[in-house]
Image: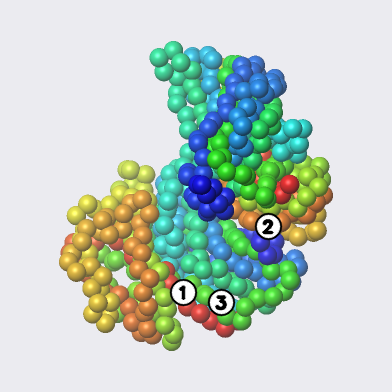
Amino acid sequence: MRGIPIELSANATLTGAVGSMAVADLGQMQMNHRAPIEVTEIRFTLNSPDVGIVIDPRGIVGVQMDMGPYRMTAGFVPTWMLAPQYNYANQLMLNNPNNTGFVRWILPQPMVLPVGYILRPQFVKLPEWANVPTPTGTVNITTSLVGRALINGKYPRKTRVPYVSAWVAPDNALSNSEIDLRNDLDTTIRVHRMIGRMSDTTQDQNKGGTIANGHTASAIQRVLIKTSYGYNITPSPTLFKLLFPSQNEILPLEMDLGPGEGFAVKLDTAPAYAARPHISFIASREESI
Amino acid sequence: MPVARPAILNKLKPPEDRGVPITLAAEAIVAPGEFSTLNTDALRNNTASPIEIREIRFGGFLTDPNLVLLPLGAGFADVDLKIDGVKLMNNPVSVALLDRTEGNGWYYSTAVGGVGAMAISRYKLARPIILMPGQGIEPSLYHRSVAPSPLALRVAFAGRALSSPPPERRWLPYIASFQKTVTIDGSGTAANVTIVTSTEKDLLNASGKTVRVERIAGRLYRFVASGSNTILQEARISADGDFFANTKVRLTDSRGFNYAFDTPMPSIFDPARRNWECPNNMPPNSYIISETTIPSLAGATSAQVAYAIVGYREI
């Protein structure tokens, strides 16, 4: 029970079309007392009130995060690929105009943010936003750091920093490329789990437009996963929904990936907008602070 | 001569092996807006053994079977508990704030077969209460008028009659809460917000001991029409996305630390569990001030905010 509990929040607003970016107001994520912070969770609340149709903003808004000089994501990752969705129905309101979604990312291990270090989230409208009839619609995003302020000023000299990489399968792609789901760092990372989800971005405007809810899935998609050094995570093609069960969408791993190593994913059904696999891995590594 | 089993071995056994399960329960019919003190004899340890209580359950049962749904999310009752005159709560607290249930947040059934709707709230204690022989728990229950019908309010304390001496260190729960109903703007204009602030007397550690806080519970309710009645209903992302997400919270403690500053309510009080798990120590006479900014909601008239600090202290 060292320190005091704390939740620091910052807002960002995305406007503009596909590819537009926004950075959270970093001044709001500073302690009023200069003390290191031990971050245990990062939470996002996303709300798209003026797009005129039903959308799930979490699947079509990407986030890139840095902690001080250290990268936490491999480029932009859809916000919903950071964490499993345990209570799906309670964390979403897919209802025009109240398109509100919530993401709770419990970090693999608490991360210490020393005084002077900033956790910097940057958001982008992902390509799926092109399916939304009003692509310049607003997305209001709140980022919250949850943890405790170490008011005695003492903190360890090393901390584990998360690292997340995600792959959203493009149309007709049967496998990922060498730059997806890869350890781009020059240090070994510990992969704790993979998260798998199927999205549905149907373009039928008669149904209310673009929907990306993650739970309308093809029942037949099977997947083979192995590491770049040839170790089979799945020895034979496995149903996607068996590998990533709907209850938590997690495949626990606890394995190391060296610099440049990654995962190769092979699908046996070409993805389309109605059933698109999203796969990410959540890892961490030790860094000096 | 048989050798007595060393008591220390009993302490090392899992709870389910340490004694006989026992439940103390009592019930009262309470009209809307009224208080009732339950039968303390039914909630007294009349055995020769200490009782270790690990869970307290509250049940509300509508006596009118024509009212379909009892919205437990709104907390059908406020409760105030004492043990031999020692208060466990700073002020009466809604049973919904004690529950940590995921999902819909309540167990309930609608009216069926002439039997009224029911709901159950469950408070799992972080540290058990030890009731020595002869000691009793005195609950007072207040019908929060969430439904316009008398409620059969039931309290049950579940635990074990210990077969060995109780532990030397004992704990009692401590809960401090703040609940306030306010009129909010119903025009839907974004700039017309309502600010609700607690005082130093609400979320206060008045126990005289350091309280180990397990969590802070938070709820936002609004009054809605249900047929010809007006009922209290909990705001959730799945029902009130914008309204809930745009309600901002500040929590500042008596030492001047900001626990949260203009943070959206669902970010602090996880929509699934409606609690912020934040273990920390609260010194005697320290307090937390909450300031809630409630946005305008088209067609709405009133809203209610509720917070509780839930923890325990050593006695």
Relative to B287, A118 lies left or right: left
Residue closest to the eye, B171 or B142? B171
Q: In the picture, which quadrant includes the N terminus of chain A? A: bottom right
Within 10 angstroms of label 3, few (less than 14), some, or many (20 or more) residues?
Answer: some
Q: Which residue bears the numbered disc 3?
A: A159
Q: In the picture, which quadrant includes the C terminus of chain A? A: bottom right
Q: Is the residue at mark 2 from the same chain as the one at mark 3?
A: no
Q: Is residue A123 above or below residue A242?
A: below
Tell me which chain the residue with mark 3 is part of: A
Q: CA distance from mark 1 to mark 3?
A: 10 Å
The disc placed on residue A284 is: 1
The answer to whether residue B264 of the structure is visible from this angle is no
Q: Is the residue at mark 2 from the same chain as the one at mark 1?
A: no
Relative to B130, A274 lies left or right: left
Give amino acid for label 1.
Ser
Residue sitting at x 54%, y 59%: A43
Give amino acid for label 2.
Asn
Element under disc 2: strand
Tell me which chain the residue with mark 1 is part of: A
Tell me which chain the residue with mark 2 is part of: B
Give amino acid for label 3.
Thr
